[in-house]
Image (cartoon, grey):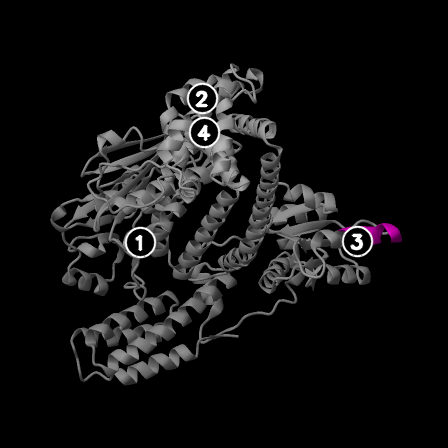
Amino acid sequence: MKSEIPVLFSSMDKFIDSKEEILKQWLAYETPKKILKLHLIDKEFFIQNYAGGVFDYFIGVISGELEIGNCPIMQDLLSYLKNREIEADELFEICSHFKRAMVDFTYDEGFNSKNIFDEISYIFDKNFRGILKYYTDTIFQKLIDARQEALSASQAKEYFLSNMSHEIRTPLNAILGFVQVLLDDDVSKTHRNYLDIIHNSGQNLLSIINDILDFSKLRSGEFTLDPKVFSLHDELSHTMELFVASANAKNISIISFIDPRIPIELYGDALRVKQILSNFLSNAIKFTPENGMIKIEASYTSGVLNVSVSDNGIGIHSQDLQTIFSAFAQSQHSVDSRSDGTGLGLSICNQLAQLMDAEVGVESTLGKGSTFFLKVPMQIHNKQSKVFKKIEEFQKLKTVFYIKDKKIGYKHESFIKYANIFNMNISVVDNLDGEFDLCLFIHEESSEDLLQKILLSDKKFIAIMSKKYDLYEENSHINSICFPLYCSKIHTAFEELINPEVYIPYAKKISQRYKGHLLIAEDSEANQELMKILLSKYGLTYDIANNGLEALELYKAKKYEMILMDEQMPVMNGNESIRKIIEYEESRGLGHTPSSVLTANVLKGARERNLLSGFDAFLGKPIVLKELERVFSSYLKSESISARLEQREEKQEVKIILGLNKAKLQKELLLEEDELLMLLNLFLVKMKKVLAQLSEAIADKDYKKIGLLSHSIKGSSSNFRIKNLQDISTEMEKAAKKDNSSYLYEKSLKEIVSIVDKIKIV
């Protein structure tokens, strides 16, 4: 027996030392408690007279001192339970929860593994196959039936998880797909920010779904890592942004310093790093009081990534620091009892860290706050660390930071730390009288008089804000960024302000086109629309089938270069359809048409099952463009974007801008035609909004608002060299500043509207 359970045998002393704890846990579960109560069995009586003997018997079997069946206490227990009219399924439940108590003990003590789980199951199953059959065939058969029901329930669970995966991933595929389509287009900065949040939240949801589907792996010791090349700067910034809304709800400031010197590409499991950081952040927000502060820091030293999350919350008692990373552990000596949760989060973080050969830990002072940290070995994939692409241009600026009385606080330091690393010429000032190219200021710390000066100034400003407000959207000389700060956010803020004419929001462009006519089988209308857009972007034509049977009929009638087919569809599913298509090919002596399954079912075995059905490739949902391109590159002929554009150049319709000299603008602003058209379109959308607000302000005789809006028009029109619009808005701004009631505001407004209306793209 020892040779069959070596891990369990070596851990036997741990079980013996905790006998009382295991027995109490056994009968603390809800199901055994209910059964004993239903049959009027006292728990302490049961432990004293039977449970202890059962435990000793199992230890004897593990040690090799006893054999299966050599247990008089089991005979007494069976007789006693039969006399209390306990049914076979109830007996099975009581006994199975003894096994559960043994397994959970291994988790609580931190020595769980797949091997020890399997060995406990082996002893349990072998015992009840032997003991129960030995004493009563009737009860044994009922237990076998109950076990079969349990297996059926397990199969039903797997079926449920498979369908849950499909039902959630299918709409998520459409959501993430269309967000990606929008991100590929030219959208405003505000809308791009919203789309990024939706996309990152969707990816986070997808990760949670994957964790739910993989929960059994962690419990059984089968969980594995998935190391890949990734950008830590991108991953950490995305993770932080997910928690901004919940932090803002409590007026908590998230202050971050992601060291710009961290290599731009590392190699490791980014998802698990984000999972640990997310748990640290979630706890920090939970335990930090309103108007508090959370600090996130990341650095890379000697091959080790260091990430920490500090808060000024309730802290952790020194007695709890040793157990805080154990399963179900929560601080029992907290100064605040408002927390809730399972207590599993930090335990999972600890297990994930162990898988990565990493370390998690905590330092805390009760009543002052805590710092949770992660130290994980990471390989460098790309040593480049220059995340600021035009740092030399920013270094030339005479930049000042307005700080009242020059008293530097933690919010100011958050930016200054980045500036110091990049050797930017930053001076602290307490007035705006001196010369400067650009001025930074903390919005929430600024007086009304200061804000009025900034709004009416001709110089450039960056407002650092705790929350996202649209206060400066209409002011071309002011840009705004919100905490938390990181490299890409700061870089974008500078670039938009310094080079507004040439700044184009980043969009991923498809660099490869393919040739071919494809057959798409998909029953979801949203996903059909997504596939139409994606295939069109890749230069492909297509036919759409609503189910596997329609796909089969279309295939028989037309020639296709490739087939993309959903797995679960009505009438005929994808696997059956592809088998019939292959049979048709073979019966007619036709060449093979490559195919890929499109499925939201990504459970273990799904890929193998689909490939065995006849598919050549596997694509999971949500669709990842890199994977889609990989499949296309494997089976379709390709052509470059430039070749496609050359073919279309003669046929392409030339856009004309009425009311402006397009050629002159392109030359002066150094813009391509599509870039100019995009910026001009944004200008016209903005003007429509501003003119409506200006009309209301004139009607209300709100001279302050008239001045701000006319100033905004002046700045925007100057970018496009619209001199007559610039002149009228300048005169209106001067009149409004003087509260000049005799100025003909309505007449000037009509002139402005007339000029704007003449600017059209045709």
| Foreground: disc 2 or disc 1 | 2
**Three-letter code for the amino acid on which mark 2 is drawn:** Asp
- Residue type, mark 4 in image: Met
Would residue 753 be found to the left or right of residue 667 on screen?
A: left
Which comes before the other along the chain, label 3 or label 4?
4
Q: Position of residue 20 (x, y in %)?
A: 36, 26
Identify the disc placed on residue 481.
Answer: 1
Q: Which region is colored magenta?
A: 579-589
Report x, y in % for residue 397: 29, 48
Q: Can residue 622 be seen?
A: no
Q: Which residue is mark 3?
A: 580
The location of residue 107, given as percent across then percent down, is 42, 30
Mark 4 or mark 2, earlier in chain: 2
Q: Picture coordinates of residue 201 (x, y %)?
A: 43, 52
User: Tag 4: Cα neighbours inside 10 Å, few (<14), some, or many (≥20)?
Assistant: many
Visible in this render: residue 689? yes
The structure residue drawn at horizontal position 77% and vertical position 62%, both measured from the top left corner, is 554
Residue on which disc 2 sits = 56
The CA distance from mark 4 to mark 2 is 13 Å
Q: CA distance from mark 2 to mark 1?
A: 66 Å
